[in-house]
């Protein structure tokens, strides 16, 4: 009996020692940034794990042509779903829209639903590819901004200095062009 007990104890210790390794998880990294190009302003939220994207959320304002929220998700580095909802300029007026595209493991669209106003509109294969390329380009922009350490800081101007929300300390920031007085007041 003593012999069996002496064999069982080391086995339990080995199993117990291994369980601590399996509890280690790789953290999800979140990066928030933004960009203005022409009339379009985009704010991005990227979640990634070990440099692989998990999700990319964005809020895009396109001047007088509308705005939308977008969320893309990846699995194992492959784009799996794109969702957009907002307003866009169609038929000479701003109309609400929503878009859902789902992709298989090979990147082929397996589901689509595009609604403009009250109409459901089918997307052509070239339109689907355009949406895929747009998301991949947005991901590239966010990764480039991340490499440049361009972060989005939410705050307010106080005596000509930017004070980040939740802070009392002014931050050193530089703008490519001087801020108009009306923007600085907001």
Image: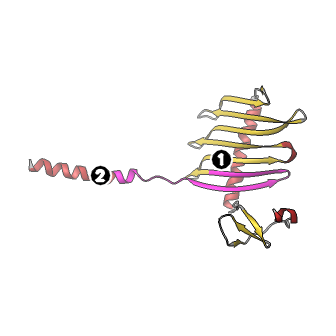
* 3D distance between C-alphas at marks 1 and 2: 38 Å
Q: Secondary structure at mark 1?
A: strand
**Does the magenta segment cover residue 47?**
no
Magenta part of the protein: which range? 19-46
How many marks do you count on the picture?
Answer: 2
Q: Identify which residue is drawn at 68% across, 72% down.
A: 169
Identify the residue under disc 1: 56
User: In this image, 93 relative to 28: left or right?
Assistant: right
Q: Which color scheme is applied?
A: secondary structure
- Is there any visible trace of residue 124 in the rendered image? yes
Q: Along the line of sight, which residue is nearer the eye, 154 or 103?
A: 154
Q: Along the line of sight, which residue is nearer the eye, 136 or 163?
A: 163
Q: Identify which residue is drawn at 68% across, 33% down.
A: 101
The quadrant of the image that shows the C terminus is: bottom right
Identify the residue under disc 2: 16
Q: Where residue 100 sits in the image (x, y, percent)?
A: 69, 33
Q: Secondary structure at mark 2?
A: helix
Q: Along the line of sight, which residue is nearer the eye, 182 or 112?
A: 182
Q: Residue furthest right?
A: 92
User: In this image, 10 relative to 145: left or right?
Assistant: left
User: In this image, 125 relative to 6: left or right?
Assistant: right
Give the vertical position of 124 relative to 21 (above or below).
Answer: above
Structural crowding at the residue carrying mark 1, measured as other residues with C-alpha within 10 Å and reported as few (<14), some (14–19) or many (≥20): many
Q: Quadrant of residue 173?
A: bottom right
**Does the magenta segment cover residue 44?**
yes
Q: Where residue 162 sits in the image (x, y, percent)?
A: 74, 68
The disc placed on residue 123 is none
Q: Identify which residue is drawn at 64% across, 51% down.
A: 46
- Is there any visible trace of residue 180 in the rendered image? no
Q: Where residue 63 sits in the image (x, y, percent)?
A: 85, 48
């Amino acid at each position: 009996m003593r012999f069996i007990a002496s064999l069982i104890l080391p086995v339990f210790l080995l199993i117990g020692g291994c369980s601590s390794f399996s509890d280690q998880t790789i953290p999800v990294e979140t990066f928030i940034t933004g960009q203005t190009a022409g009339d379009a302003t985009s704010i991005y939220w990227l979640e990634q794990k070990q440099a692989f994207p998990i999700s990319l959320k964005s809020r895009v304002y396109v001047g007088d042509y509308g705005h939308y929220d977008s969320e893309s998700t990846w699995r194992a580095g492959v784009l799996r779903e794109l969702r957009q909802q907002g307003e866009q300029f169609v038929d000479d007026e701003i109309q609400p829209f929503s878009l859902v595209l789902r992709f298989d493991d090979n990147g082929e669209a397996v589901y689509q639903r595009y609604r403009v106003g009250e109409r459901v509109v089918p997307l052509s294969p070239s339109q689907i590819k355009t949406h895929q390329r747009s998301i991949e380009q947005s991901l590239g922009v966010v990764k480039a901004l991340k490499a440049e350490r361009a972060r989005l800081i939410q705050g307010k101007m106080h005596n000509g200095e930017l004070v980040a929300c939740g802070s009392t300390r002014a931050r050193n920031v530089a703008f490519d062009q001087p801020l108009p007085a009306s923007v600085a007041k907001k």
